[in-house]
Amino acid sequence: MTIDNLNQRFALPGHIQFKEGPGGLAVAEIANAHAEAMIALQGAHVMTFQPRGQEPVLWLSRFGKFAPGKSIRGGVPICWPWFGPHATEAGFPGHGFARTVMWEVKQTQALPDGASFLRFGLIETEATRAQWPHPSTVELQVTVGAELKIELVTCNTGSAPFQLGEAFHTYFQIGDVAEMEIRGLEGCTYLDKVDNFARKTQEDAVTIESEVDRVYLDTAADCLIDDRRLNRRIRIAKHNSLSTVVWNPWTEKAEKMGDFGPEGHRGMVCVESGNAVDNVVTVAPGATHSLATVIGVEALG
Ligand code: TA6
């Protein structure tokens, strides 16, 4: 569907318009009384979210490669229908294919409270079916208001159950990594990916002084990013999620990845709400599973 077609069918004055974004990617541009946001149709990828009067909440690399089929570095990449490497196929893309394939706009709506609602559906192809042969549908529902609500809805339309790994791989904008801590994971068990997946327990708030790549298990808790530099707290609430991943690549890995930019890792941290490893979800035939997160900014308590 061309940009003109998208605007004819789904634009909403005072809320949503479609345009060509970075790298020529089709994007939905949202601007309402509460916030501004941008969502690429590729990957149904929420790239930016900025409540009025606030600094951007999501980190988006200025050095990212915005190109068809390439995952965008920053915002909210959708990891689906598996998290991390595929269990058996090394050649399949890490974190699944959802974030690099095209999604279609299904619905847009101006909500009574002034927020904007958008619903996207993943466009199945022979390539996606080759990697995920289970009859299913997946939609992303985004509400842009004073808070950002994202819901990933998976339906099993087949006659056999399937296992699902998923996450919102959210990159958060922070003032400086040395002046922030992540609370809400105290006492949780985590797999430490920088220490051969050793199982450990989180004693206190999470602080970051080197590469951190941890999958916290069996936790439904909100996470709080307390940012002393920007003098704000970001609350990350989640629903139907038992895993939280915390990731900062630090200097060496960020440089190897090549799209963080100089010292880019200092301005971001990933706090990812999903279901991974021990927490993968079994979706029964005919069942619907919905993973959701609500992201908002508060005063630093
Ligand atoms: O969620 C953390 C992680 O799994 C890291 O291990 C690292 O691979 C990161 O995701 C980024 O992955 P990407 O495929 O987006 O470069």
Image (cartoon, rainbow, N blue to C red):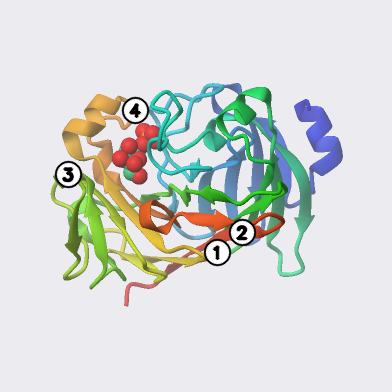
For this orientation, the residue located farthest to the right is 8
- Residue carrying label 2: 289
Left or right, 293 with respect to 28, comes to left
Q: Position of residue 68 (x, y in %)?
A: 56, 22
- Residue carrying label 1: 147
In the image, what residue type sits under mark 1? Glu
In the image, what residue type sits under mark 2? His
Q: CA distance from mark 3 to mark 2?
A: 31 Å
Disc 3 + disc 1, Cβ < 8 Å: no
Q: Secondary structure at mark 2?
A: strand
Residue 37 seen: yes
Instruction: First in sequence, mark 3 or 1: give its number.
Output: 1
Disc 3 + disc 4, Cβ < 8 Å: no
- Residue carrying label 3: 196
Q: For ligand 1, give the image quadrant.
A: top left
Q: CA distance from mark 2 to mark 4?
A: 33 Å
Left or right, 105 with respect to 101, comes to right
Q: Dot 4, how many residues are within 10 Å of its Cα: few (below 14), some (14-19), or many (20+)?
A: some
Q: Secondary structure at mark 3?
A: loop
Name the residue located 37 percent from the left edge and 58 percent from the top edge. Answer: 244
Q: Position of residue 4 (x, y in %)?
A: 81, 29
* Numbered badge on residue 259: 4
Instruction: First in sequence, mark 2 or 1: give its number.
Output: 1
In the image, what residue type sits under mark 3? Asn
Given this view, does label 3 or label 1 mark the residue nearer the observer? 3
Q: Dot 2, how many residues are within 10 Å of its Cα: few (below 14), some (14-19), or many (20+)?
A: some
